[in-house]
Image: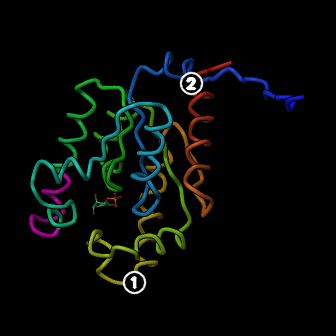
């Protein structure tokens, strides 16, 4: 006799429902090191959506990394370019996952545009984790190289926290794996979109 085959019950996938309701981009916001790019890429793969990273788009447009643009042209020009780029990404109407640079959502007009035309998701991670992650490639974050990394991150959280808190969804992003964060975002999106 052959072995009895056990087939686990097939759970109907909820993704088609989610994608059916999704009529706008999903935009990840939060501080440097929160995992926006990695989580964003995985979330996009999970939902079968295109992924765009605004820092990479800056790099493609200028031939320089976001950090180099920041250093070479100064913060004001960087912010201005970033604001225009994010606006273009939103206005072209693509439904996708967008990871923004940590300062993009701090800008009042960008924040308003994103909250009107996208679903905004704040990845909220503790300073110790942000400091640990951003220490891995320090050359990519010029803002953190001007003093004590943890202190700079703490004061950025203080300044920016109330703004990030205006996002539609807040996801605590702890040291648990990125896939847990992705699943937490999917669950929060389902709730946000009113899925049964
Ligand atoms: C910045 C975050 C960086 C990059 C730039 C400024 C910020 O992006 O845009 O160095 O002001 O928080 P990441 O959040 O992707 O590191």
Tag 2–tag 1 contact (CB < 8 Å) = no
* Residue at (32, 55) in percent of width and height: 103
- 34 above or below 40? below
Q: Main secondary structure of the magenta part?
A: helix
Left or right: residue 10 versus residue 91 is right
Tell which quarter ligand 1 is in. bottom left
* Residue at (25, 40) in percent of width and height: 86
Q: Nearer the viewer, residue 99 or 87?
A: 99
- 126 above or below 1? below
Left or right: residue 162 versus residue 96 is right
Q: Quadrant of residue 191?
A: top right
Residue labelled with disc 2? 15
Q: Quadrant of residue 195?
A: top right
Using the numbered discs, state the Cα–Cα distance from disc 2 to disc 1 in whole angstroms: 43 Å
Residue labelled with disc 1? 148
The mark nearer the N terminus, 2 or 1, is 2
């Amino acid at each position: 006799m052959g072995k009895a085959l056990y087939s686990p019950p097939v759970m109907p996938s909820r993704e088609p429902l989610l994608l059916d309701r999704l009529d706008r981009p999903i935009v990840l916001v939060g501080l440097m090191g929160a995992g926006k790019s990695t989580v964003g890429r995985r979330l996009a793969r999970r939902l079968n959506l295109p992924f765009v990273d605004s820092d990479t788009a800056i790099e493609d447009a200028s031939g320089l990394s976001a950090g180099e643009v920041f250093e070479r042209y100064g913060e004001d020009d960087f912010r201005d370019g970033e604001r225009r780029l994010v606006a273009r990404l939103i206005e072209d109407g693509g439904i996708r996952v967008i990871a923004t640079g940590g300062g993009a959502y701090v800008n009042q007009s960008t924040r308003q545009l994103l909250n009107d035309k996208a679903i905004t998701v704040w990845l909220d991670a503790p300073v110790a984790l942000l400091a640990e992650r951003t220490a891995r490639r320090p050359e990519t974050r010029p803002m953190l190289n001007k003093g004590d990394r943890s202190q700079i991150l703490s004061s950025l959280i203080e300044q920016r926290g109330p703004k990030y808190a205006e996002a539609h969804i807040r996801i605590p992003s702890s040291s648990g794996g990125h896939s847990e964060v992705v699943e937490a975002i999917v669950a929060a999106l389902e709730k946000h979109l009113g899925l049964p």
